[in-house]
Image: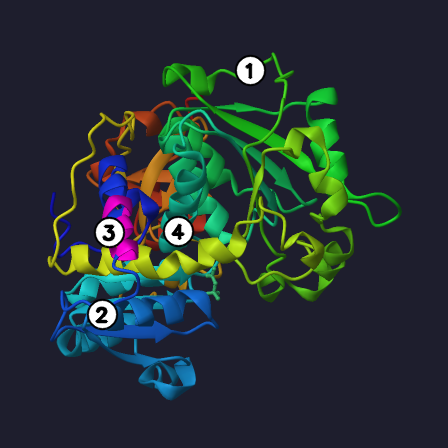
C-alpha cells in the first residue's frame, strides 16, 4: 500500500492496516542498524519546531539523514517571519516550495492541519498544542507491540495529565482502534477532554465505564501516594464494544474488575499550558516508584512515558526491566524513517497479514460557514488565524446539538440555528431546527449574532 503524498496530522489519518505497514517498515529500518540508506537522497525535510523539543525534532532529523536526505529548519517563531505576522498558511505555501516534506510543531491546536492544507507537500504533525502527537503514538504502539506482541486485548493505563497531554489523546484513539482496554487515571481536574471520550465511544466503538470502589482503588491509591499531597485519581475505563449502540447506553455494571494492567503510560504535568491558578496541581501529582511497581496489579506492567519526565517517574526504577521509556524514545528514529520514506513515496507499506478490526463506525456531517459560530478554544488555530480560516465543525451530537471544531476538536453547543433559504432562525431545541439540513444551516451563539447577519426570529418556539 502507498502513503505517497499523504500527510499525518491526526493518528486517525491512517488506518489500522497502514499503521501496521508503518511499524513493519520501521522494523526493517531498525534492522539496518543505523547504517545510512540512500532511499531519500536528494530530498529535503523542513523541520519547523515552534515549541521546545529534544526527541521529536532530533529523531526526525536523524531519520532523514539516515535515509540519505537533508534537513532545513527553524526552531523558534522569532527567527521566522511568523514573528512579523505572516500566516501559517503563507509560511506553509513557501516552505512547501523549498522542501519535499514538512514536520511542524506549534502551540496552536490545528496548526499542522492548516499547514497540510496549504503546503502542497506531505506535512507531519509533531505536536499541536494540547491536541495530538501522532508520531509519538506510533513510537508508543511500536514499543508495546515489540514487548507484548499485540495490542488487542491488553489493558493499558494512561496516567497523569490527560487533559493537556497530547500524546495521550492520539494514543487513546489508537488503543481503542486496536481493541485494547484503556484505563484513564487522571490527576484531579486533568481528565481527558470530552471530545476524546466522545470520539472513543461514538467513532471507535468504545464502551465507557466510570467505576467506583474496590476495582480501581488498589492501583489508583498506589499511584496517588499517601499523605497530605496525595492525589485522588479519577478513573474511567474504555473497553472495546461490540456495537455502536452500546456506546450510547450508560453501563450500570460499573464494577469492572481490574486484575492488572499490561502497561502504565505516565505523563508529566504540562505546566506550560496552565494558568498560574492551577499550579498547585503539581503537589498532588501521581508518581511511579519502586513501591508502586511492587503491587501485584503492576507485576507485568511495562512503564512507558513520552518524556521528558519531571518527578512522576522516580529515577530508582530506571533499571527495572519493565521501564521502557528510553527504549521508546530510541525507537523514534526507525519509526520516523519509515514514515518519511512512505509519505515521500520512496517505499511501499506491506499490507497486514491479518484483517484488522473495524474502525470508524460513523462519519459525522461537516458544517462550514464563516457567518455564524466560531470555535471558542483560545488555543485553536482558527481563532488565531481567523482572517482566512472559515470555521468548520463536525456535527457530533444532536441532543443537545454539539459541534466539534475540525482543527482542534473542541466541542461547543450553539443556541440558535438559521435556515439559509428562509433567513429565519430558531432556538436549537425548537423542533423545526432539527428539520433544517446541515448544508442549509448557520449556527449562532446568540439572537443578536443571528440578527446582525440578517436572520429573522421564528414566529413561536416549538419545543423538541
Ligand atoms: N515525546 C516528545 O515529544 O518529546 P520532545 O518534546 O522532546 O520532542
Task: Name the residue beneath numbered marker 2.
Answer: 36
Task: Name the residue beneath numbered marker 3.
Answer: 28
Q: Residue 256 vs residue 433: left or right?
A: right
Which of label 4 and label 2 is nearer to you? 2
Mark 4, ligand 1, within 8 Å: the answer is yes
Which of label 1 and label 4 is nearer to you? 4
| Element marked by disc 2 | loop
Which of label 3 and label 1 is nearer to you? 3
Decide: is 460 above or below 77: above
Task: Name the residue beneath numbered marker 4.
Answer: 139
Q: Residue 431 vs residue 189: left or right?
A: left
Mark closer to the chain start, 3 or 4: 3
| Element marked by disc 1 | loop
Residue 379 lies in the magenta stretch:
no
Which of label 3 and label 4 is nearer to you? 3
Residue extent of the magenta highlight: 23-31
Disc assigned to residue 464: none
Task: Name the residue beneath numbered marker 1.
Answer: 251
Residue 436 image position (x, y, % from top left): 26, 30
Main secondary structure along the magenta-highlighted residues: helix
Amino acid at each position: 500500500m502507498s502513503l505517497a503524498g499523504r500527510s499525518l496530522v491526526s493518528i486517525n489519518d491512517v488506518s489500522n492496516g497502514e499503521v501496521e505497514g508503518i511499524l513493519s517498515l520501521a522494523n526493517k529500518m531498525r534492522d539496518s542498524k543505523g547504517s545510512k540508506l540512500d532511499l531519500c537522497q536528494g530530498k529535503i525535510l523542513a523541520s519547523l519546531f515552534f515549541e521546545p523539543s529534544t526527541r521529536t525534532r532530533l529523531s526526525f532529523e536523524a531519520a532523514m539523514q539516515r535515509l540519505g536526505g537533508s534537513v532545513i529548519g527553524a526552531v523558534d517563531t522569532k527567527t521566522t517571519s511568523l514573528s512579523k505576522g505572516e500566516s501559517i498558511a503563507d509560511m506553509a505555501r513557501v516552505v512547501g516550495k523549498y522542501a519535499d516534506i514538512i514536520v511542524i510543531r506549534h502551540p496552536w491546536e490545528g496548526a499542522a492541519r492548516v499547514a497540510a492544507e496549504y503546503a502542497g507537500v506531505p506535512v507531519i504533525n509533531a505536536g499541536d498544542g494540547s491536541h495530538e502527537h501522532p508520531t509519538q503514538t506510533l513510537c508508543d504502539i511500536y514499543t508495546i507491540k515489540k514487548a507484548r506482541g499485540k495490542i488487542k486485548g491488553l489493558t493499558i493505563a494512561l496516567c497523569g495529565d490527560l487533559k493537556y497531554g497530547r500524546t495521550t489523546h492520539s494514543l487513546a484513539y489508537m488503543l481503542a482502534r486496536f481493541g485494547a482496554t484503556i484505563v484513564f487515571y487522571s490527576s484531579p481536574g486533568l481528565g481527558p477532554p470530552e471530545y476524546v471520550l466522545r470520539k472513543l465511544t461514538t467513532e471507535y466503538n468504545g464502551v465507557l465505564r466510570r467505576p467506583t470502589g474496590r476495582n480501581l482503588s488498589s492501583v489508583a491509591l498506589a499511584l496517588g501516594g499517601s499523605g497530605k499531597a496525595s492525589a485522588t485519581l479519577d478513573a474511567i475505563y474504555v473497553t472495546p464494544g461490540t456495537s455502536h449502540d452500546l456506546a450510547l447506553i450508560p453501563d450500570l455494571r460499573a464494577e469492572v474488575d481490574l486484575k492488572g494492567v499490561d502497561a502504565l503510560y505516565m505523563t508529566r504535568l504540562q505546566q506550560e499550558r496552565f494558568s498560574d491558578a492551577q499550579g498547585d496541581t503539581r503537589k498532588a501529582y501521581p508518581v511511579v516508584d519502586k513501591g508502586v511497581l511492587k503491587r501485584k496489579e503492576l507485576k507485568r506492567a511495562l512503564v512507558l512515558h513520552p518524556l521528558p519526565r519531571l518527578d512522576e517517574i522516580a529515577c530508582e526504577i530506571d533499571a527495572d526491566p519493565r521501564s521502557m521509556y528510553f527504549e521508546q524514545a530510541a525507537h523514534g528514529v526507525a519509526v520516523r524513517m519509515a514514515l518519511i520514506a512512505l509519505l515521500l513515496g520512496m517505499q511501499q507499506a506491506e499490507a497486514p497479514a491479518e484483517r484488522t478490526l473495524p474502525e470508524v463506525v460513523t462519519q459525522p456531517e461537516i458544517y462550514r460557514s464563516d457567518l455564524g459560530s466560531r470555535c471558542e478554544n483560545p488555543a485553536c488555530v482558527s481563532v488565531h488565524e481567523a482572517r482566512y480560516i472559515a470555521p468548520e465543525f463536525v456535527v457530533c451530537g444532536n441532543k443537545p446539538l454539539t459541534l466539534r471544531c475540525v482543527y482542534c476538536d473542541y466541542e461547543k453547543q450553539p443556541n440558535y440555528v438559521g435556515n439559509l433559504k428562509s433567513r429565519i432562525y430558531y432556538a436549537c431545541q425548537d423542533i423545526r431546527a432539527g428539520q433544517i439540513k446541515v448544508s442549509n444551516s448557520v449556527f449562532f451563539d446568540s439572537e443578536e449574532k443571528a440578527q446582525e447577519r440578517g436572520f429573522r426570529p421564528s414566529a413561536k418556539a416549538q419545543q423538541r
